[in-house]
Image (cartoon, grey):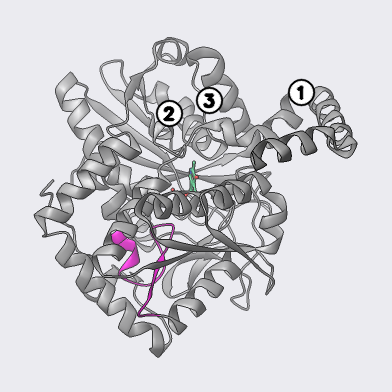
């Protein structure tokens, strides 16, 4: 509590040359109001106390910082520690931002929440936060993603959210963002837009970083209490919310090394990855309200991306990360799909910890650099989420025949219809 908020490096939400607020006139007022309300809330002791209590009782903070003894021995260098952010309620770091923004919306007197979602993780966290806080929730989701991510759609509906399939453009995440912006522009007084990562027009990158920086502050305290000397911190980077929150308390210090792991997909070619800082199709651009590094073609159109992890395949990156990457404070590395899968296996077998595929990119980067550091230094990996959610992706890779049998058996069982009728008559009672 009482941690001061870091404002943007320069005025109007710029981080060096990145960031800003490139939006239509109708969105300027809601964004300005949001910036003021956020600043006021972060100086309001009562708001901060409420946030602390809900973080403790509902999210389950603080999350553990877990020593990984076998990994440390096998990798032969720095001590390996894992920040178990995946133990947060709903299974990932996204709830930190969703709860923070929903509390802020309540303080602003808004009763309706909208959000965009790609793989469904942010939509799920926002739906849960709205259920907890008694807010009306609508989630925009590309039609393609709705079809691919049924388990998360089911969870959002269980939490009482309305999931609206988006049928424009490529019918994926960036189209869902556009739809949410349109809704917000039409309903600015009743509605708050909970953006899901540390990007978009100002003040969203500042707000999302602030609500996620609880991760980094805990790590700093946990390491100080236990005398852990941090040599490097590693996080995966999609839009950049878990990484910027994890790095935040260390950005203005010379040490430790801060390392961001991007999705290397299946290789360096066009459409084969989502490497915005290390890839050869990355360039500066302005999209969806902010200036940053994007994967763009010669005409400035967004290129398709690819990653085995649903949460790392966005074509842009948060503006502050782009600036810190260009300045050299944050190092970026690209991790292939198969390296991420190997890391899932490595930490499951050796530590009993199941990484989400996104987080496994950070795990894989740590595996690569552990040897570069001496044994009296620690490498801290942010496990942004846990891997239970990935069973539909990992099982077909690790045990394809058994998984196919399982799916066939499930279809037969459901087409038989008996279990469904039983369940329906049960829920009717
Ligand atoms: C969404 C997600 C990410 C990527 O988003 P960031 O904003 O870059 O943190 C990473 N890990 C998990 C588990 C996610 O759900």
> Element type at marker 1?
loop
For label 1, being within 8 Å of ligand 1 is answered: no
Q: Which residue is mark 1?
A: 399
The answer to which of marks 2 and 1 sits earlier in the sequence is: 2
Quadrant for the N terminus, please: top left
Quadrant for the C terminus, please: top right
- Residue 336, label in figure: none
**Would residue 354 be seen by someone viewing this image from the given angle?**
yes
Residue 239 picture location, percent across and down: 46, 55
Q: Dot 2: within a 10 Å radius of its alpha carbon, few (fewer than 14), some, or many (20 or more) residues? A: some
Residue 126 location, quadrant: bottom left
Residue 64 location, quadrant: top left
Left/right of residue 269 with respect to residue 110 in the rendered view: right
Q: Which residue is mark 2?
A: 369
At a point 29% along the width and 57% down the height, the residue shown is 103
Residue 276 picture location, percent across and down: 51, 57
Query: How far is the residue under mark 3 from the one under mark 1?
Result: 16 Å
Taking the magenta stretch, the answer to whether it contains residue 192 is yes
At a point 69% along the width and 68% down the height, the residue shown is 170
- Residue 354, label in figure: 3
What stretch of residues is rendered in magenta?
A: 188-207
């Amino acid at each position: 509590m009482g941690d001061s908020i870091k404002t943007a490096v320069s005025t109007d939400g710029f981080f060096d040359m990145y960031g800003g607020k490139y939006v239509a006139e109708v969105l300027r007022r809601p964004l300005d109001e949001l910036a003021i309300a956020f600043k006021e809330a972060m100086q309001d002791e009562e708001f901060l106390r409420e946030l602390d209590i809900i973080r403790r009782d509902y999210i389950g903070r603080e999350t553990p910082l877990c020593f990984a003894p076998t990994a440390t021995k096998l990798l032969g260098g720095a001590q390996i520690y894992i920040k178990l952010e995946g133990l947060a309620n709903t299974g990932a770091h996204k709830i930190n931002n969703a709860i923070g923004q929903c509390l802020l919306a309540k303080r602003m007197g808004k009763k309706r929440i909208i959000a965009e979602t790609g793989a469904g993780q942010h939509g799920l966290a926002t739906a849960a936060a709205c259920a907890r806080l008694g807010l009306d929730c609508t989630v925009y989701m590309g039609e393609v993603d709705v079809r691919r991510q049924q388990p998360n759609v089911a969870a959002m509906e269980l939490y009482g959210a309305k999931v609206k399939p988006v049928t424009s453009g490529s019918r994926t995440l960036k189209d869902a963002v556009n739809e949410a912006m349109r809704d917000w522009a039409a309903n600015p007084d009743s509605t708050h837009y909970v953006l899901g990562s540390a990007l978009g027009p100002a003040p969203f990158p500042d707000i999302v970083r602030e609500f996620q920086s609880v991760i980094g502050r805990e790590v700093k305290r946990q390491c100080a209490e236990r005398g852990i000397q941090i040599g490097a911190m590693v996080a995966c980077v999609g839009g950049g919310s878990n990484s910027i929150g994890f790095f935040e308390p260390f950005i203005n210090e010379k040490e430790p090394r801060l390392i961001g792991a991007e999705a290397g997909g299946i290789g360096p070619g066009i459409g084969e990855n989502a490497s915005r800082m290390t890839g050869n199709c990355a360039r500066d651009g302005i999209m969806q309200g902010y200036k940053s590094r994007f994967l763009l073609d010669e005409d400035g159109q967004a290129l398709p991306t690819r990653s085995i992890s649903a949460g790392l395949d966005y074509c842009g990156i948060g503006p502050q990360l782009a600036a810190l990457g260009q300045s050299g404070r944050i190092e970026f590395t690209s991790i292939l799909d198969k390296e991420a899968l190997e890391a899932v296996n490595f930490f499951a077998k050796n530590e009993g910890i199941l990484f989400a595929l996104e987080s496994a990119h950070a795990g894989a980067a740590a595996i690569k650099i552990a040897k570069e550091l001496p044994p009296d230094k620690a490498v801290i990996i942010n496990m942004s989420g846990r891997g239970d959610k990935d069973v539909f992706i990992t099982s077909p890779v690790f045990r394809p025949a058994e998984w196919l049998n399982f799916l066939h058996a499930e279809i037969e069982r459901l087409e038989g219809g008996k279990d469904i009728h039983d369940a329906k008559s049960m829920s009717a009672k």
